[in-house]
Image (tube, grey):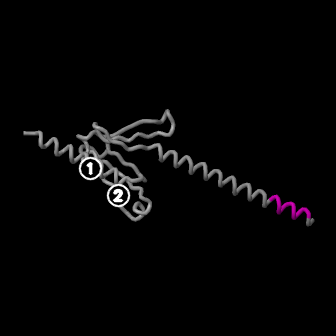
Amino acid sequence: MLVLLTTALQTTHANAIRAFFGSLIIFALFGCVWVVRARSVVLFMNADGVWVQSGLFPWSRGAYGLKWRDIEIAYYDRGFIPWITRSYKVRVINRFSRVAEITLTQMARGNEAVLLINEKLQSMVRASSLQQP
């Protein structure tokens, strides 16, 4: 009876260890996929406007964005958690429609991206207002 109880406890203990490490591996895999997915989103600007390129797999890659003439303003949400993590929710607002806007959550250095977008937008507005008679 004692041998049976000892064997059962060892089996239960071994199963618990296997379950723990199996769960740990699954969580690590999900964490890796989350990090790779987050790194697959890129916000960039060029002479035409502000764009987002995203997609983890080749068949899911794509881009969308706003032209400079359609952008009203870019801003980021401030708060304690974003300040601690240095990752912000960034929004680039379309001046004609609230449906077509760029919204990115948990963007690293999003505050710097917003500053660059707004500086470029203001310089373009100033340049176009100086050229008009």
Residue 68 lies, in percent from the top left, at 25, 41
Residue where numbered disc 2 is placed: 77
- Residue 118's disc is 1
Q: What secondary structure is found at the residue carrying circle 1?
A: helix
Check the image and name the residue furthest to the bottom. 2
Which label sits in the foreground, 1 or 2? 1
Rendered position, 54 above or below 26: above
* In the image: residue 67, left or right of residue 29: left
Identify the residue at image location x=28%, y=39%.
Answer: 67
* In the image: residue 10, left or right of residue 116: right
Q: What secondary structure is found at the residue carrying circle 2?
A: loop
Residue 101 lies, in percent from the top left, at 32, 45
Identify the residue at image location x=30%, y=52%.
Answer: 115
* In the image: residue 1, left or right of residue 67: right
Residues 95 and 74: in front is 74
Q: Residues within 10 Å of mark 2 (few under 14, many from 20)?
A: some
Q: Which residues are magenta?
A: 3-11
Check the image and name the residue furthest to the top. 59
